Image (cartoon, rainbow, N blue to C red):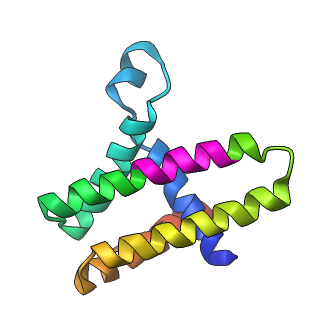
Amino acid sequence: MKNVLTLLALVALMASGTPTVAQADGGEQPTLAERATVMTWRIAERTQLSEGQYVKLRRLNVGLLSEMAMLRKQLKAEPANLDQSLADLLQRYEWDVAALLQPKQLAVYDGLKSEFTAVNIR
């Protein structure tokens, strides 16, 4: 469960940490695709992804964020089911990311999760 909370914190920080052009201009919330792009760039700049890996990771991030939004909407009245569904979703995401990255990239990615968790605790 701690890993799930860690990953949720990582996703939340990565998806909302950098303001987008839309936010700066009109104060609007970024779209799901924009949030996925920010998430992907943050991972890509640290793990040195290839172009193909970047495209695949962005696709994974779009899927993750859209499924998270759907689950939150569907299960908002059932917190226990929501937590379990999010945990399952994040576990699948982690599995897919691990399959996408090379071993050195995966080690950097795991370090990123630790950094974001440490920042979130402080």
In the foreground, 19 or 2: 2
The residue shown at (80%, 60%) is 81
Toward the bottom, the furthest residue is 103
* Left or right placement of residue 97 versus residue 92 in this view: left
Q: Answer above or below: position of 27 versus 58.
A: above
Identify which residue, 16 or 54, lies in the foreground. 54
Residue 57 placement, left or right of 6: left
Give coordinates of residue 44: x percent, y percent: 25, 60
Split into 4 quadrants, where in the image is the C terminus?
Answer: bottom right
What segment is highlighted magenta in the picture? Answer: 62-71
At x 56%, y 66%, the residue is 90
| Residue at 60% across, 76% down | 3
Q: Is residue 122 visible?
A: no
Pinpoint residue 98: horizontal percent, then vertical percent: 37, 77
- In the drawing, does residue 74 fall left or right of residue 80? left
Query: In front: 52, or 117?
Result: 52
